Image (cartoon, grey):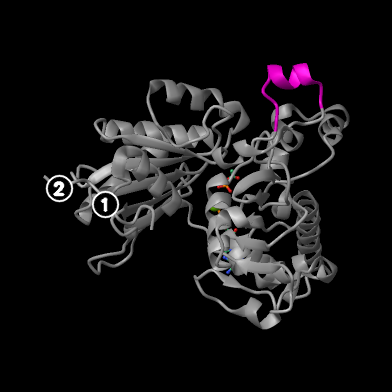
Amino acid sequence: MTTPTRVLVLNSGSSSVKYQLLDMRDDSRLAQGLVERIGEETSRLVHTPLQGGGAKREKNGPIADHAAALKSVAEELAADGLGLDSPELAAIGHRVVHGGLRFTEPTVIDDEVLAEIERLVPVAPLHNPANLTGIRTAMALRPDLPQVAVFDTAFHTTMPESAARYAIDVETADAYRIRRYGFHGTSHAYVSRETAKLLGKEPAEVNVIVLHLGNGASASAVRGGRCVDTSMGLTPLEGLVMGTRSGDIDPAVTFHLKRVAGMSADDIDVLLNKKSGLVGLCGDNDMREIRRRIDEGDERAALAFEIYVHRLKKYIGAYYAVLGRVDAVAFTAGVGENAAPVREAAIAGLEELGLAVDAELNSVRTDEARLISPDYARVAVAVVPTDEELEIARQTFALVGGETLGGVNA
Ligand SMILES: Nc1ncnc2c1ncn2[C@@H]1O[C@H](COP(=O)(O)OP(=O)(O)O)[C@@H](O)[C@H]1O
Ligand SMILES: CC(=O)OP(=O)(O)O
Ligand SMILES: [Mg+2]
């Protein structure tokens, strides 16, 4: 019998599922794909076989819920001879956004772990329910296989109390477990390590500010490989300006809206999570579209961009101060990896801090981690592509006993 070496990674978002099938002998990808707009009439599945020369396949049409989405994913994989029934599958790894304080490590999922993820739904209402459906569906398809949860919050559990605790009444905070948890931790961990590698150093030797700028966006201060502060809080709403989320606001805005505008808690939740950020400021949440509008002279798009960059710059300064000495600032995720104007504008004017961006290096497009700062700059500025799926697959495989095989710690 062959030893199973494959891991399927599922990243279930509020309206999408991203997936990858990897072979952990050499970290190679066998297939990847995305189901988006789940629950709408216009759902879409894009499946890409990455070995054997098959072409990308696309299916359009309604997919009612996450369970149906996962069944379609299983069918696509089966059509490539990579079905979930394969004896080569060692485990399924799930991104779980909120793990509270309990889960500091990847965890094999059982009924009790499921109950704890369920208990955390109120603090990750957009994410944890989708994660749970993904897990339950995968468990029904392969009840015999280990299912592993890899938590967005885990990397941030090393934060000191001075960073994690909000300055509110201690009894109330403790009774309701209100504190800064932080998210995107798998990405912050991976990118801070890859940044050290790019500098030719060990993670323990470097201090890095990681800027994960996707649809959700967060910053973190990483000292010697450990997170010491991060911008998201109790929920993924705090911090940077995001695609549809406000990030930091005066909390009094919420009671003002309740008292003066008569909005309910749910109305305000939707306003701040779904109708704010870039989309609230200018009607678009995609940075490509915003840049296009700016090039056409659109003033609302230009102001949205300035507000986005101003917030980013504030966090760079804040985390510089938290760390004291900074070796690198690393940009990652959709915006961070692709939007050169965001990187340029966020670093502009920070020469006194030893930070600068070289225009030519900044304009290069590759999938490799690279430096964009000039030689003379004291602090490295880098673009470091994130790979949450690979990181989840490695942690999952190591947990189910695959650590002795090549590739895992390569
Ligand atoms: N070429 C590009 N130029 C500028 N921004 C881009 C580009 N490609 C993607 N983006 C931005 O990246 C975002 C998606 O980032 P991603 O990390 O994939 O998000 P998520 O994982 O949160 O869905 C898009 O909404 C868009 O703003
Ligand atoms: C936690 C979070 O904000 O995740 P995403 O960016 O995938 O929405
Ligand atoms: Mg993401």
Q: Which residue is mark 1?
A: 77
- Is residue 56 depicted above or below 321 in this figure? below
Tag 1: Cα neighbours inside 10 Å, few (<14), some, or many (≥20)? many
Q: Kindly indicate the quadrant of the structure image that contains residue 401.
A: top left
User: The residue under label 1 is which amino acid type?
Assistant: Leu
Q: Does the segment drawn in magenta span residue 410?
A: no
Report whether the residue tagged 2 is closer than 8 Å to ligand 3: no
Q: Kindly indicate the quadrant of the structure image that contains residue 289.
A: bottom right
Asked whether residue 30 appears in the rendered view, the answer is yes
Tell which tag, 2 or 1, sits nearer the viewer.
2
Give, as a single range, the part of the protein colored magenta.
168-179
Q: Which residue is mark 2?
A: 2
The residue drawn where x is 81% and y is 42% is 249
Q: Does the segment drawn in magenta span residue 175?
A: yes
Image location (x, y in percent) of residue 275 = 70, 46
Tag 2: Cα neighbours inside 10 Å, few (<14), some, or many (≥20)? few
- Determine which of the numbered discs, if any, sits on residue 231 in the image: none
Asked whether residue 45 appears in the rendered view, the answer is no
Q: Kindly indicate the quadrant of the structure image that contains residue 261.
A: top right
Q: Earlier in the sequence, mark 2 or mark 1?
A: 2
- On screen, residue 402 versus residue 106, left or right, reads left
Image location (x, y in percent) of residue 88 = 21, 47
